[in-house]
Image (tube, rainbow, N blue to C red):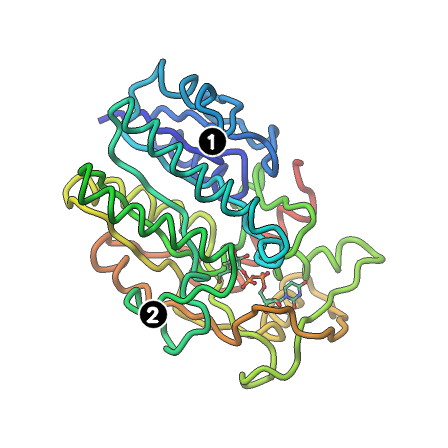
Amino acid sequence: KKLSLLVCGGAGYIGSHMARMIAEAGHDVTVFDNLSTGHLEALKWGKFIKGDLRNQDDLDDAFQDTEFDAVFHFSGLIVVSESVEKPFEYYDNNVTGTINLLQAMRKYGVDKFIFSSTAAVYGDPVMDMITEDHPLKPLSPYGRSKLYVEEILQDYAEAYGFDSACFRYFNAAGAHPDSRIGEAHSPETHLIPNVLLSCIDEGRRLKIFGDSYSTPDGTCVRDYVHVQDLCSAHLKALNFINENKGAHVFNLGNGQGFSIIEVIKAASQVIGREIGFDFEPARSGDSPRLVADSSKAADLLGWEPEFDNLTSIIETAYRWHKKPAF
Ligand code: UFG
């Protein structure tokens, strides 16, 4: 059946890949985005409504003409350190904005919701391979803003019969293999883009934050997961919440941890040259190791990542960063 789907934050990194995948799967897609961090140039698929989740009139514009089957929500501020400096902006955008969106959904009778959450809800991990029942103790306003929404969705399932899936992303990376869209943050804070950009832009030297973590080489270990694989899980979740009522949460990661030094080595092989770097003091709030057990998504959604090795993820990111379309 052809569906009509709303993608909030569809001009951003993950949201634009989602809007494209929905359109290419043959469904109708509408993107709602305030373009605060997203890019107009990423909007090559579907209909676009410029609007802010904190403005009810903007939400009415989105909902009044189309009967959506479900809403995907990627509109979030995502920089952990910034959230410590600006908690109001994070709670206003990520929590108040989401409550407004859920209210508009109730008003227009839409009750299927898929939400971008984060591994940051776990805080300092006590498990080697993190499962969804790991304690939830976020270390930043960013992580708390995501956790609050997860909890709100539990209450909405109970009270209003809302069906939802929250995805706790580990480290999203890579770009669409044809590189018409990709990752374009400003400023860029993520590791893989910064490694690649340090090779592409002369003058831009890579910094490694922290060399004495309790990991084999002293640098932080992360689980990198391809943006296309994140999006394919969202499409599968849509079928799942249609058949299974309630509020569901899933980890999304490849289940393999790589240290910063290992990421640099892999990137160096992809690019074919050495990559220089300097050690800097550790960034506050960084966990030594975040690696996902994603067997719940595999078992219940039938999710199987296509880009299951770091090199293939870096290759798609490099193709994009060499010649970004925006
Ligand atoms: N790092 C560097 N140099 C850089 C950039 C990053 O050394 O130029 C280090 C960081 O200190 C960290 C690791 O590389 O140890 C990964 O950093 P990222 O910024 O790429 O990703 P994070 O793990 O900090 O955060 C990401 C998302 C968050 C999300 C988190 C969950 O940005 O939104 O994953 O795992 F909460």
| View extreme (right): residue | 203
As helix, strand or loop, the secondary structure at mark 2 comes to loop
Residue at x 47%, y 44% (from the top left corner)? 94
Please name whichever residue, 69 or 225, is drawn nearer the observer in this view of the structure. 69
- Quick check: 169 left or right of 114? right
The percent position of residue 85, horizontal first and vertical second, equals: 63, 55
Q: Quadrant of residue 30?
A: top left
Q: Position of residue 59 (x, y in %)?
A: 42, 23
Give the alpha-carbon distance from disc 1 to disc 2, as whole Å: 30 Å
- Report whether 282 appears left or right of 15: right
Q: Residues within 10 Å of mark 2 (few under 14, many from 20)?
A: some
In which quadrant of the rendered image does the C terminus lie? top right
Query: In front here: 200 or 14?
Result: 14
Task: Judge the density around disc 1: few (<14), some (14-19), many (≥20) Cα neighbours within 10 Å.
Answer: many
Residue 272 sits above or below residue 114 on the image: below
- Residue topped by disc 2: 135
Residue 105 in the image: state x and y as whole percent: 31, 28
Q: Residue furthest front?
A: 88
**Quadrant of the rendered image containing residue 277:** bottom right
Task: Please state the quadrant of the image where ligand 1 appears.
Answer: bottom right
Q: Amino acid at mark 2?
A: Pro
Identity, as a three-letter code, of the amino acid under mark 1: Leu
Does 124 sit above or below residue 159?
below
The quarter of the picture where the N terminus appears is top left
Q: Evaluate if marks 1 and 2 touch, with contact meaning CB atoms under 8 Å apart.
A: no
Residue 70: give x, y in percent of width and height: 29, 32
Residue under numbered circle 1: 53
